[in-house]
Image: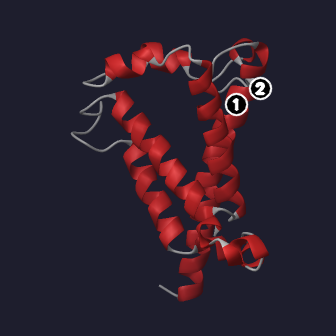
Amino acid sequence: MDSNKFKAVLGILRLSIGLVFLWAFFDKLLGWGFATTPEQAWLSGGSPTTGFLQFGVHGPFAEFFNSLAGSATVDWLFMLGLLFVGVSLTLGIFMKLGGWSGILMLLLMYLAVGLPPEHHPFIDDHFVYIFVILAVVWGNTQKYFGLGNQWARTSLVQKYKIFQ
């Protein structure tokens, strides 16, 4: 495959996974009616995590995840995580922190849905998304269709490489 075509695919892949996180954030915040109804939106007083943590978790870690349901701290961490990961991957800034944060969130969701997953002995969409994020972070995709080149020249990133 032509190098420029591959770079374009990686850039589009980064944008895509970033937009998945951003969409989840705004749907839970505003209740756009896809996964969250307007009445259940966070801005309407709903909890972005309680329904899933009460009724959507299965497997050996279900009791632990059930115990987190209704926690305002968990709601805030989840929503800030969705926003941070979504913005960082979509714009190509804070890619290392955003990528690893996204991987942590996806790993926790993977463990929450139950082992083994419903449709495969060990793979589900969370597992696949982990590898997508690894590919876009390790592939330096912030340079393709993103602000990564400009971001890398800032004094903050020059001083603290973790902020790349």
Packing grade of label 2 (10 A; few <14, some 14-19, many >=20) is some
Point 63% across, 17% down: residue: 47
Pointer 1: what residue? 27
Q: Quadrant of residue 76?
A: top right
Point 65% across, 33% down: residue: 79
Packing grade of label 1 (10 A; few <14, some 14-19, many >=20) is many
Q: Is residue 120 left or right of residue 24?
A: left
Q: Secondary structure at mark 2?
A: helix
- Picture coordinates of residue 41 (x, y %)? 72, 19
Q: Is residue 149 left or right of residue 121?
A: right
Mark carried by residue 30:
2
> Do residues under tags 2 and 1 come within 8 Å of each other at their CB atoms?
yes
Q: Quadrant of the C terminus?
A: bottom right
Q: Is residue 27 placed above or below 93 in the rendered structure?
A: above
Q: CA distance from mark 2 to mark 1?
A: 5 Å
Q: Could one spot residue 35 in this view of the protein?
A: no
Point 49% across, 58% down: residue: 133
Point 77% across, 76% down: residue: 155
